[in-house]
Structures are given as C-alpha cells and as structure tokens.
Image (spheres, grey):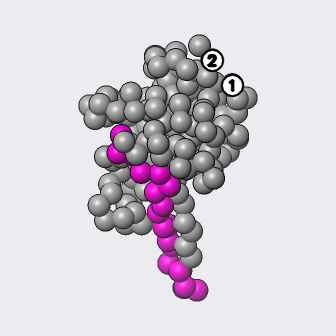
Amino acid sequence: MSTHICSSNSWSFNNGKKIIEEKQLLTDLVEIATAYQKHGGGNQYMSERAKRLDPLGWQQEVSTKFEAKTVDGTFSRRGSFDAYKDGVLVEHEKGEQMRANWHLMKMEAAYRESNGLDDSLNVEVGVLLIPDYVNFPTLGRTQNDVHAVLANYFDFSIPLFVWEYPTVE
C-alpha cells in the first residue's frame, strides 16, 4: 500500500489536516488504513488490528452515548468509533455513502458535546478513511455532502480530514 497522502486523494475541512499534521499523526493514519486493508473491519478482527495500532497508542472501538431528554423520558443511542488517540476520532468505511455520513454526524455530535465519551477523551478532529477500490463512499461525494448538506443545513463544524487511500501500489 502506498504511504503517500496527497491532495489528489485527500480533503481537509476546517483545518483538519493541519491539526493531524501538528499532532504528527499522518503516518499513523497509514498504519490504520493498512490494518483495515489487511484485516478488515468489525469486532472479529480487532485483535489483528491491535497488533498494529496498540503500539502506536490508538484505542479501538471507543464508544459514546448520545442522549435527548423529552417529556416522555430520555432517549439514548450508543455509537462507537473505529479508533481514537489524542483528540482524533477515526472511522473507516468501505460500504455505503450514507454510513459514511452517519460516521460524520457521530463525529460532529461527539465534537460538540463530548459528555458521552470517557472523561479523559476530548474530540478535536475527525478522520474518515475510505479505500480507493469502493464505489461509495468516495472522497468527492463526501466533500459534496459536507458542503452542500451537513455544513449548509446542520452547521457541521468539526475539523475533518478525509483520505481515500490507495490499496494497490
């Protein structure tokens, strides 16, 4: 797998890439993408991915709780993120554009209100990793969805970095 993250296969929103660079985590994103390419997603492959991610200090499956209080009580939903380290939430998606958008909405909610996360965790930036062989999601479609819908109608504001990583050299 290529380790080169360039402007033709990545996109930054609200200085997301700058934050990742300041934290010196761009090369870690290559390791995360490689772990997903080699071992796939899902809970059944966590231990294989952990061999790559644990030495770098990344936590897998960090969860949060979203709540809304109503006159009928409290509605809640749990959401999890594929990886977390030093204020950086990472999601990997290779299946559907709508799932990618759901990942982005979860990141935004955690960024705005981190009460559902462990007290020691804060959210500064989100990262969406997409393998280049899939039809959806895509880098361009994600960029369009953020600008045309999420930022325009829902005040999407989390600094974001999206990398459509190459899977064949």
- Farthest residue toward the bottom? 72
Reply above or below: 133 against 66: above
- Horizontal side of 61 relative to 85 (left or right) equals right
Estimate the spatial distance between the alpha carbons at disc 2 and disc 1, rounded to whole Å: 9 Å
Question: Quick one: label 2 or label 1, which is nearer the N terminus?
Answer: 1
Residue type at tag 1: Tyr
Pointer 1 residue:
133
Q: Nearer the viewer, mark 2 or mark 1?
A: 2
Image quarter where the N terminus lies is top right
Q: Position of residue 11 (x, y in %)?
A: 48, 26
Pointer 2 residue:
168
As for residue 51 lying within the magenta part, the answer is no
Q: Position of residue 44 (x, y in %)?
A: 63, 53
| Residue occupying image coordinates x 42% and y 66% | 116
Q: Position of residue 68 (x, y in %)?
A: 51, 73
Residue 4 visible in this rendered orientation of the protein: yes
| Residue occupying image coordinates x 46% and y 57% | 62
Q: For numbered disc 2, what is the local secondary structure?
A: loop
Find out whether the residues at labels 2 and 1 contact each other: C-beta distance under 8 Å. Answer: yes
Q: For numbered disc 1, what is the local secondary structure?
A: loop
Residue type at tag 2: Val
Residue 75: numbered disc: none
| Residue occupying image coordinates x 36% and y 64% | 118
Q: Position of residue 148 (x, y in %)?
A: 58, 36
- Horizontal side of 14 relative to 145 (left or right) equals left
Reply above or below: 141 against 126: above
Q: Which residues are magenta?
A: 56-74
Residue 146 visible in this rendered orientation of the protein: no
Q: Residues within 10 Å of mark 2 (few under 14, many from 20)?
A: few
Reply above or below: 147 against 10: below
**Based on the displayed image, in which of its 4 quarters is residue 79 positioned?**
bottom right
